[in-house]
Amino acid sequence: MSMKEAYQKKLQAQLDEWNAEIDKLKAKADKVEADAQIEYYKKIEDLRSMHETANRRLAKLREASDDAWDDLKSGIDSAYNSLGNALKSAVSRFK
């Protein structure tokens, strides 16, 4: 397995894990009072948008040549770090 393939698998696994976390937040939001739901749903919408951005970057990585993928890595890492931090913040905020 190449470094690119290993990196892609790692990123996809992380995206899948985060998607499950976002789904958990959505389930929690469905159970809270109306006022709190607005805040939950707004944050979930932001997280889904960040997730989609990270997913698009992963798709670009898959399409990149073996020589070019390393150039994309820093942008992908940045998107993943932003999503990870936002998700951690949301999970701790909505406990």
Image (spheres, rainbow, N blue to C red):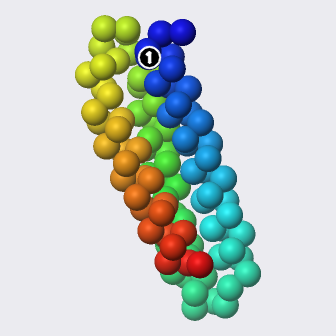
Q: Secondary structure at mark 1?
A: helix
In this picture, is 48 found above or below 6?
below
The answer, for residue 12, to whether it is visible in the render is: yes
Q: Quadrant of residue 25?
A: bottom right
Residue 63 shown left or right of residue 36 in the figure: left
Q: Which quadrant of the rendered structure holds the C terminus?
A: bottom right
In percent of width and height, residue 43 lies at 49, 70
Q: Quadrant of residue 27?
A: bottom right
The answer, for residue 63, to whether it is visible in the render is: no
x 31%, y 43%: residue: 78
Residue 80 shown left or right of residue 93 in the figure: left
In this picture, is 8 found above or below 19?
above
Q: Amino acid at mark 1?
A: Lys
Q: Quadrant of residue 73?
A: top left
Q: Count of labels shown?
A: 1
User: Residue 55 versus residue 80: which sits nearer the camera?
Assistant: 80
In percent of width and height, residue 89 lies at 44, 68
x 37%, y 8%: residue: 66
In this picture, is 11 found above or below 41?
above
In this picture, is 9 found above or below 84?
above
* 10 Å crowding of disc 1: few (<14), some (14-19), many (20+): some
Residue highlighted by disc 1: 4
x 41%, y 23%: residue: 61
x 54%, y 9%: residue: 1
In percent of width and height, residue 55 lies at 49, 38
